[in-house]
């Protein structure tokens, strides 16, 4: 029997369009689907595309404070922005609720045995915390997924791998004191990028100490060094933590041609990254893996990268797409800097994790 993968998509995702001139445009979702179609991905018997339902207010309240949720609903009605780069309208709100609903649908599919893996297209709103939004994010679908699984199934240990170019400050905040969620984030050095936090020394607090793992990467970091960091940090921690599920979020903004970030991943790098997560989840949690690709601000490379991520998750052996631009050479200092960061991280976390001793 082949392993099934459910992928959630809704035409109304296009309403998550933050306006003319804004880097977050609503056509990303359908453009990615069209590219998947052209690559023959949607015809594979492994994949079934499912239309999600909107998340309910009650489900949002598993993560978010009521006052904050009410604020967003009110701003939507009044068509007022949450902040300068995060507009809100009834259409954006409707799409946001469908995207979060998609992540819940993915969780259900995996834990009701309908699929081994699932892909929540368009999600990963990791800058939203319990009582704040920002950075284009209103509700944190990753955390809602975690809480939905915790409430409805026997799922107690979650590993979130955040490979977005930006640090997921919202997700990190929500679980900073929670040892049931191991949050690992690889992102561009926060001194050079929004949201300006996500340092190595931010390792969690109280019972959650050691369960927040940040790997800041210097601008220019390319595939091999990125994969090196994953092999040294994500893989051993996953093996020791033994999660019930691996949830991975991030779109294409770590690609070298992205307009908002300065990391140096290629399309093939995203494929390798996704395959590694799949292999690791096969080893540690019977393959339970939920992929959430959503970000990306270069519309030309976005479909390529999302395709590479999806192809890696479903287990394709190779992809046959040509990198749209010529990749740069990684600056010489990057590898050394990342090796130092990994060593520093191990020193900070060795009390908690045997694999780092
Ligand atoms: Zn991002």
Image (cartoon, rainbow, N blue to C red):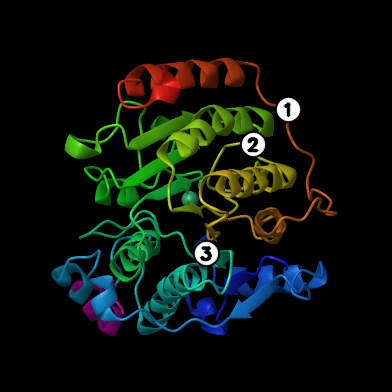
Disc 2/disc 3 C-alpha distance (Å): 24 Å
Residue 225 within the magenta-colored segment of the rendering:
no
Q: Earlier in the sequence, mark 2 or mark 1?
A: 2
Question: Mark 3 — residue?
Answer: 21
Q: Residue at x 55, y 53 (%)?
A: 286
Q: Is residue 197 above or below residue 344?
A: below
Determine whether the residue tagged by mark 1 lies in a helix, strand or loop.
loop
Q: Is residue 177 above or below residue 124?
A: above
Question: Would you place residue 42 above or below residue 215 in this image?
Answer: below
Label 1: how many Cα within 10 Å (few below 14, some 14–19, many 20+): few
Locate residue 116, reporting x and y percent: 58, 64
**Which image quadrant is residue 131 in?**
bottom left
Residue bearing mark 1: 329
Q: Main secondary structure of the magenta part?
A: helix
Q: Quick check: 307 above or below 59?
A: above
**Residue 77 image point, x, y percent:** 27, 84
- Give the magenta-colored segment's residue range: 71-80
| In the image, the residue with mark 2 has its CB under 8 Å from the nearest atom of ligand 1 | no
Residue occupying the far left of the picture: 67
Circle 3 — which element? loop
Determine if residue 100 is in view. yes
Give the numbered dot on residue 339. none
77 inside magenta stretch:
yes
Q: Is mark 1 within 8 Å of ligand 1?
A: no
Label located before the other in sequence (3 or 1): 3
Q: Pointer 2: what residue?
A: 264
Q: 133 or 116, which is in the foreground? A: 116
Per the model, the C-alpha gap separating discs 3 and 1 is 30 Å
Answer left or right for 81 relative to 33.
left
């Amino acid at each position: 029997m082949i392993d099934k993968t459910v992928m959630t998509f809704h035409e109304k995702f296009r309403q998550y369009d933050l306006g003319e001139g804004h880097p977050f445009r609503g056509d990303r979702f359908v453009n990615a689907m069209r590219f998947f179609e052209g690559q023959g991905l949607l015809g594979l018997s492994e994949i079934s595309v499912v239309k999600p339902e909107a998340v309910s207010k009650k489900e949002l309240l598993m993560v978010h404070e009521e006052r904050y949720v009410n604020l967003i609903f009110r701003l939507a009605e009044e068509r007022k922005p949450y902040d300068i780069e995060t507009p809100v309208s009834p259409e954006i709100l409707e799409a946001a609720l469908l995207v979060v609903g998609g992540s819940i649908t993915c969780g259900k599919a995996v834990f009701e045995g309908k699929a081994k893996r699932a892909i929540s297209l368009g999600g990963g709103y990791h800058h939203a915390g319990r009582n704040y939004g920002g950075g284009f994010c209103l509700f944190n679908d990753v955390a809602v997924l975690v809480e939905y699984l915790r409430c409805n199934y026997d799922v107690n240990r979650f590993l979130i791998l955040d490979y977005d170019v930006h640090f997921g400050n919202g997700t990190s905040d929500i679980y900073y004191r929670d040892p049931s969620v191991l949050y690992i984030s690889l992102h561009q050095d926060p001194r050079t990028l929004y949201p300006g936090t996500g340092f190595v020394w931010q390792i969690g607090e109280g019972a959650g100490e050691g369960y927040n793992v940040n790997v800041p990467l210097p601008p220019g970091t390319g595939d091999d060094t990125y994969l090196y960091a994953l092999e040294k940090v994500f893989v051993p921690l996953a093996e020791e933590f033994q999660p019930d599920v691996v949830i991975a979020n991030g779109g294409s903004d770590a690609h070298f041609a992205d307009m908002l970030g300065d990391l140096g991943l290629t399309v093939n790098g995203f494929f390798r990254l996704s395959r590694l997560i799949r292999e690791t989840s096969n080893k540690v949690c019977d393959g339970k893996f939920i992929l959430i690709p959503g970000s990306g601000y270069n519309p030309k490379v976005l479909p390529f990268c999302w395709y590479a991520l999806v192809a890696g998750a479903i287990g394709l052996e190779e992809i046959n797409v040509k990198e749209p631009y010529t990749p740069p050479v990684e600056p010489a200092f990057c590898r050394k800097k990342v090796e130092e960061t990994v060593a520093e991280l191990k020193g900070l976390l060795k009390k908690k994790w045997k694999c780092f001793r």
